[in-house]
Amino acid sequence: MLLLWVGQTDGPWDGQMVRWTVWRWAQALAAVAMAEELRVRAVAARTRVAVVRAMVAAAMEAVARAMVAAVMVMAVAVTAKTKVATAALLAAHTAAQTELVVRAAATKAGAVRATAAAAMVMEAAARALAMELLSALLMELPMALPSVLMRA
């Protein structure tokens, strides 16, 4: 599917965009594999160090999900060539950063309730932003659709 997408791109910076996309995709897959390995080690060891490793694995998994989302949004950005797709990429990155902050703060026993409240507020804000960006992208998609169909 990636090769099919690569064949449909055009423009002055598509080669750089393709290299960036492939590099991010490989990085995301490596992060998922490392996260899974750390999770397995944590379950096997059952020590305090293993708990820390499991938390690191969860953080790496969140980063990997953000990278995969970034690759998908970049594919839309190249196809539709809209500024809205770039804004959606920033929203995905913000959501991943929020998740990492919440997981890191949740490890401190005294701040769990405050962290949960902050997480709910940040999650609501991220969802509102994502919905707004999605609706804006859907508004601009019909304008870009004819050029995409002409390439197919």
Image: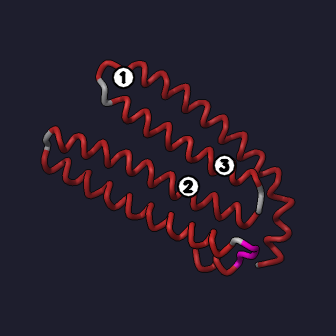
> How has the structure been colored for display?
secondary structure
| First along the sequence among labels 3 and 2 | 2
Q: What is the three-letter code of the residue carrying label 3? A: Ala
**Res. 88 mark:** 3
| First along the sequence among labels 2 and 1 | 2
Secondary structure type for disc 1 = helix
Name the residue rendered at 83%, 63% in the picture: 144
Characterize the local packing of mark 1: few (<14), some (14-19) or many (20 or more) Cα atoms within 10 angstroms: some
Q: Position of residue 12 (x, y in %)?
A: 74, 73
Asked if residue 19 lies left or right of residue 13, the reply is left
**Res. 94 mark:** none
Q: CA distance from mark 2 to mark 1?
A: 28 Å
Q: Position of residue 48 (x, y in %)?
A: 16, 38
Characterize the local packing of mark 3: few (<14), some (14-19) or many (20 or more) Cα atoms within 10 angstroms: many
Name the residue rendered at 71%, 44% in the picture: 133
Characterize the local packing of mark 2: few (<14), some (14-19) or many (20 or more) Cα atoms within 10 angstroms: some
43, above or below 150, in the image? above
Q: What is the three-letter code of the residue carrying label 1? A: Val
Q: Position of residue 9 (x, y in %)?
A: 71, 75
Labelled pair 1, 3 in contact (Cβ < 8 Å)? no
Range covered by the magenta-colored residues: 8-12
Secondary structure type for disc 3 = helix
Q: CA distance from mark 1 to mark 3?
A: 30 Å
36, above or below 78, in the image? above
Q: Position of residue 119 (x, y in %)?
A: 48, 28
State the count of labels: 3
What residue is shown with label 2?
69
Q: On the rendered image, what quadrant is the N terminus found in?
A: bottom right
What residue is shown with label 1?
112
Name the residue rendered at 73%, 67% in the picture: 79
